[in-house]
Image (spheres, rainbow, N blue to C red):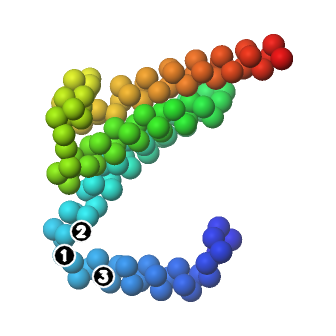
């Protein structure tokens, strides 16, 4: 493959073996394994899709990094909660965030990440222009 250093045949063999092992587990086990992963990945992916829709208006990479950082943290906390790893502090933080009733707990932190990292980029840009 031109993307990785692995040969195509090895990638196919690996994929077939993983698919075979997953098929043995059954639907319930597959769901139990995939839900925490998806709960972590979905907020990051959705926020990146939204950012890419407005990509021509976003002038720097800091914004992308900030939004991914903030939504990733919330996604990680929710992912850990989905497998039963919780504490009272994270539960209370997640409950007070806007849109948590709708499963969009990551939306407000993503917006905060956007604002903070946009302002940080402007500050860095001003400092660089003075030098």
Point out the tag, 1 or 3, that comes first from the N-terminus: 3
Q: Is residue 3 above or below residue 53?
A: below
Q: Is residue 86 left or right of residue 66?
A: left
* Closer to us: 116 or 49: 116
> What residue do we see at 56% from left, 30% from top?
63
Circles 2 and 1: CB distance less than 8 Å?
A: yes
Q: Quadrant of the C terminus?
A: top right
Q: Is residue 69 above or below residue 116?
A: below
Residue tagged 3: 21
Q: Position of residue 87 (x, y in %)?
A: 19, 40
Residue tagged 2: 30
* SS at badge 3: helix
> What residue do we see at 24% from left, 35% from top?
90
The image's mark for residue 26 is 1
Q: Is residue 120 above or below residue 31?
A: above
Can residue 37 be seen here? The reply is: yes
Q: Is residue 30 above or below residue 58?
A: below
Circles 3 and 2: CB distance less than 8 Å?
A: no
């Amino acid at each position: 493959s031109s993307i990785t250093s692995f040969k195509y045949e090895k990638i196919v063999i690996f994929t077939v073996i993983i698919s075979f092992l997953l098929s043995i587990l059954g639907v319930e086990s597959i769901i139990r394994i995939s839900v925490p992963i998806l709960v972590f990945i979905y907020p990051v992916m959705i926020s990146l899709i939204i950012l890419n829709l407005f990509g021509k208006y976003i002038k720097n990479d800091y914004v992308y990094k900030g939004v991914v950082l903030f939504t990733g943290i919330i996604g990680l906390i929710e992912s850990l909660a989905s497998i039963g790893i919780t504490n009272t502090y994270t539960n209370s933080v997640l409950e007070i965030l806007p849109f948590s009733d709708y499963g969009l707990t990551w939306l407000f932190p993503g917006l905060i990440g956007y604002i903070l990292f946009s302002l940080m980029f402007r500050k860095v840009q001003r400092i660089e222009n003075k030098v």
